Amino acid sequence: DSEDLRRAMDIVENDFLFVGITEDFDRSVCLFHAMLGGVVNSNEFRNSRPTSRNPFFETLHEKIGDESASSLKSLFQKSDEGLYDETSLTRIHYADPYDEALYAHVRQLFYKRAAMFDLEPCLSVVSSL
């Protein structure tokens, strides 16, 4: 309910030392270092869990066979276009208003905190990778 939402917003704002957002991952890494210290490492910006060759699915192929593993893999993995098949979600037109409100609050908090630091030197390093 709205009281839980208010409490969650308060917790994120006052009890979380850092919040980042995945759709602005590079800025999140830079903000993390600006707020908490440490040296930025180029490995932090690499995709360490690519979906095209996931060891989980390779092991699955070995254990249950290619056909079964491939059909199971298609349920979890991105399509060739890089998009998840959200057909079943869009059919029901479901949105969680509390989740959406909390996420909007986190985004606002993230960009507010990001504006407090000069992240350009870090982001320029990232763009050169």
Image (cartoon, rainbow, N blue to C red):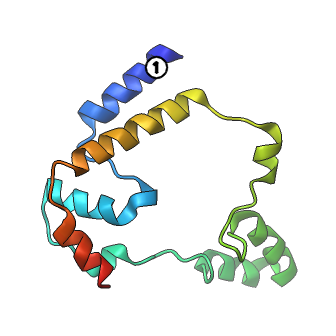
Can residue 97 be seen in the rendering of this structure? yes
Can residue 41 be seen in the rendering of this structure? no
- The residue positioned 37% from the left and 28% from the top of the image is 9
Q: Nearer the viewer, residue 9 or 115?
A: 115
Q: Position of residue 117 (x, y in %)?
A: 15, 54
Q: Quick one: label 1, few (<14), some, or many (20+) residues within 10 Å?
A: few
6 sits left or right of 127 in the view: right
Looking at this view, name the residue that lies furthest to the right.
Answer: 67
- The residue positioned 49% from the left and 16% from the top of the image is 2
- The residue positioned 40% from the left and 78% from the top of the image is 46
97 sits left or right of 83 in the view: left
Q: Position of residue 113 (x, y in %)?
A: 23, 45
Name the residue type under label 1: Asp
If the image is split into quadrants, where does the N terminus sit?
top right
If the image is split into quadrants, where does the C terminus sit?
bottom left
119 sits left or right of 129 in the view: left
Quadrant hosting residue 94: top right
Quadrant hosting residue 123: bottom left
In the displayed structure, 10 sits above or below 84; it is above
- Residue that badge 1 annotates: 4
Q: Secondary structure at mark 1?
A: helix
